[in-house]
Amino acid sequence: MDTFFLLVFIFWLGALLKKHPPSGPLMYLIPIVLCAYVLYRLWRQGYFLGHAGWRMRVIPRLQAYHFPPILEAKLRQHIPQLSRQDYTLACQALRIYLLLRYDQQEQDSSIVLPSQAVRLLWREFVLRTADYREFCQTVMFSPLHYDLEEEFTPVLSAARQRQFQHCWRAAAQIRDFGPPMADGMPLLFALDQKIGMDSGWRHKMENGSLRSQFQGQVYDSVFSADALPA
């Protein structure tokens, strides 16, 4: 269909440049139809639907995107026991987080990253500057900034507790990259323990609250389970 309309446009433009444009109604009908078709294609791709349109365009690209193969070896340097299946899960979790991060960027707010494995994978991806720039331009349609000098400090203040709560809710609602783990925990929260990363986060539900552990420190009652989606 695109080829057909392109040929029609070339024919009309060629005739116009030769000063032999189509006569009668065709003179006006052809450009009107072409413009209508272009607007229709843009609408189908979500260009006129705001943030919802952005998601419509980005999610299929995120699903189909293959991260640079070198990232698997780079992540294995941090996690020696990493299997191919573990790496696939880490990539899925990174896709989820990047989608969440852009959502929060649009709302001018921040979101926590509850997985050390995803943090390391994202960092290694950012260090491949050309690949990451192309990814942001062609997949996300927007730059996603990562501060390489930032050191994460797992201090669960009241504000960070709310960020954990929001991150859990948002991650639990995303089904485009696979279902949650068997215990219902979003992949973004379950990943570090699932792949056996000793230096990673550990999250589990206990007595209606989320217990999070990182680098030997335990944080309880981040938020109540009754605030979680079913």
Image: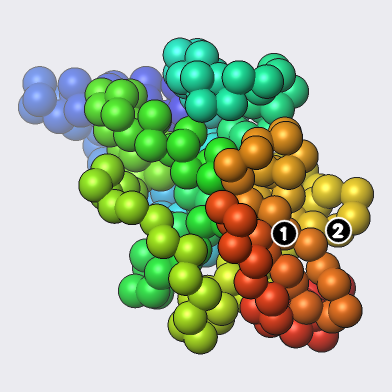
* Identity of the residue drawn at 48% across and 64% down: 154
* Identity of the residue drawn at 37% across and 65% down: 105
Secondary structure under tag 2 reads loop
Location of residue 190 in the rendering, given as x and y in whole percent from the top left corner: 73, 50
The quarter of the picture where residue 38 lies is top left
Residue ID for mark 2: 184
State left or right for residue 219 relative to residue 185. left
Vertical order, 40 against 49 (above or below) = above
Label 1 environment density (alpha carbons within 10 Å; few <14, some 14–19, many ≥20): many
State left or right for residue 114 relative to residue 190. left
Vertical order, 39 against 159 (above or below) = above
Location of residue 121 in the rendering, given as x and y in whole percent from the top left corner: 48, 33
Q: Which amino acid, by three-letter code, is at mark 2?
A: Gly
Q: Which amino acid, by three-letter code, is at mark 1?
A: His
Relative depth, front residue between 154 and 104 = 154
State left or right for residue 182 relative to residue 38. right
Residue ID for mark 1: 203
* Identity of the residue drawn at 55% across and 81% down: 162
The quarter of the picture where residue 173 lies is bottom right
Location of residue 99 in the rendering, given as x and y in whole percent from the top left corner: 51, 52
Secondary structure under tag 1 reads strand
Label 2 environment density (alpha carbons within 10 Å; few <14, some 14–19, many ≥20): few
Relative depth, front residue between 191 and 79 = 79
Residue farthest toward the front in the current orientation of the protein:
216
Image color mode: rainbow
Relative depth, front residue between 59 and 203 = 203
The quarter of the picture where residue 218 lies is bottom right
* Identity of the residue drawn at 79% across and 62% down: 204
Vertical order, 144 against 229 (above or below) = above
How many numbered tags mark residues here? Answer: 2
